[in-house]
Amino acid sequence: MVFSSSEEEHVKHVASVLQRLRDNNLFAKASKCVFHASSVEYLGYVVSSEGLKMDSSKVQQIFTWPQPKNIKALQSFLGFANFYCHFIKNYSKRITALTSLLKRDSPLSSMRKLLQCSKNKNIHHKKLGLLKPLQIPAGPWNSLSMDFITQLRLSNSFDSILVVVDRFSKMGIFIPTYGKITALELAQIFISHVFSKHGLPMSIVSDRGSLFVSPFWTNLFQQLKISRDLSTAFHPETDGQKGRVNLILEHYFWMYVWVASKNIKTTRPTKKLSEIWLGPFEVIEKIGSHAYHLKLPQQWKSVHPVFHVSLLEPVKKSIIPNRHQLPPPPVLVEEQEEWEVAQ
């Protein structure tokens, strides 16, 4: 390597070096030589008129170095990084956190287990992030939300319900339909049941179902100048009002289906439409601070009468006079009623 202060001196220096090689019968391979270069890479460094600096390709390797998972991998990383210690101020203090892991009692051996443990750990804190509710509409039927209730029992060739809710007045429209509806048919339903009676809204909130993100539905909204607000995936809090209306409607279905099917013989209870709570039962005594002993009916002898308080709910008396509570259903064993046989 030949270094000169100016280009004129560099020409003289190179000529002198080449002449010295010729006098001693030494040769240089032209393909390995670079002449009149402003910067040269040499032994991992870059030499230029500005001074000595690190090779950028070597620095990039440090940034992309895989995370060390054992002592040997950490030693390999530190050995590579130590080559550039002269370019880093207070280098020895900066790597103290890494060099301390080379000791015999280092926690590095358990880091892999801790990482795997954190991946499988249940989260007990509240969900992160602040609640950002939707903006309150300026008037009725300016902003709507919609959703489907699907997989219902077939009735008059319909097995689904389209729920459209006005976000301002909370008024809901329930339209019978079927699960395999197309985007064109959905648009016709909106024209017949919503747009023709309440006008065009400014925005409609929906989930990211295939119908709501279809090209036809998107182009229709653009032509009608309606803002299409899609909720975040797996985040029902975006439009909880719509889910609340669906819940009220489903509660109504539970009562309606119970009345309509009370005289129909079924081989087993339908879990989807079964009651959430059973009872009421009389409390005999309190056991400890978190359990209660209940008075269960005779056909429930196979059920232990002591329950944790988390499984119980206080009964609210009916305000309707002379209304009697029906007894709880019998316990089924292998989908058959259990009977007690006396000898």
Image: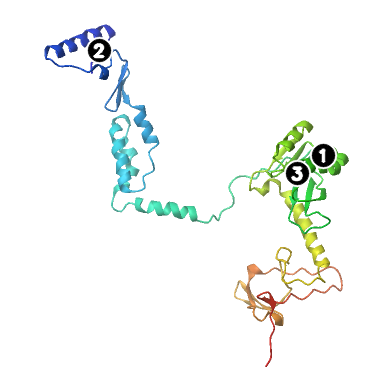
Kind of residue at disc 3: Thr
| Marking on residue 139 | 1
Residue 260's place in the image compared with 248, above or below, is below
Q: How far apart are labels 1 and 3 at the CA level?
A: 30 Å
For this view, does 252 lie left or right of residue 102?
right
Q: Quadrant of residue 197?
A: top right
Disc 2: which residue: 4
Observer able to see residue 140: no
| Dot in front, 2 or 1 | 2
Q: Number of numbered discs present?
A: 3
Q: Nearer the viewer, residue 62 or 288?
A: 62
Kind of residue at disc 1: Gly
Position of the C terminus, as image quadrant, is bottom right
Where does the image place residue 25, in percent across and percent down from the top left?
A: 12, 15
Q: Nearer the viewer, residue 212 or 278?
A: 212
Q: Earlier in the sequence, mark 3 or mark 2?
A: 2
Where does the image place residue 306, in percent across and percent down from the top left?
A: 63, 76
Residue 32's place in the image compared with 223, above or below, is above
Position of the N terminus, as image quadrant, is top left
The kind of secondary structure element at disc 1 is loop
**Going 69% across and 43% down the picture, which residue do you hit?**
210
Residue 298's place in the image compared with 245, above or below, is below
Q: Residue furthest bottom?
A: 343
| Dot in front, 3 or 2 | 3
For this view, does 203 lie left or right of residue 56?
right
Disc 3: which residue: 182
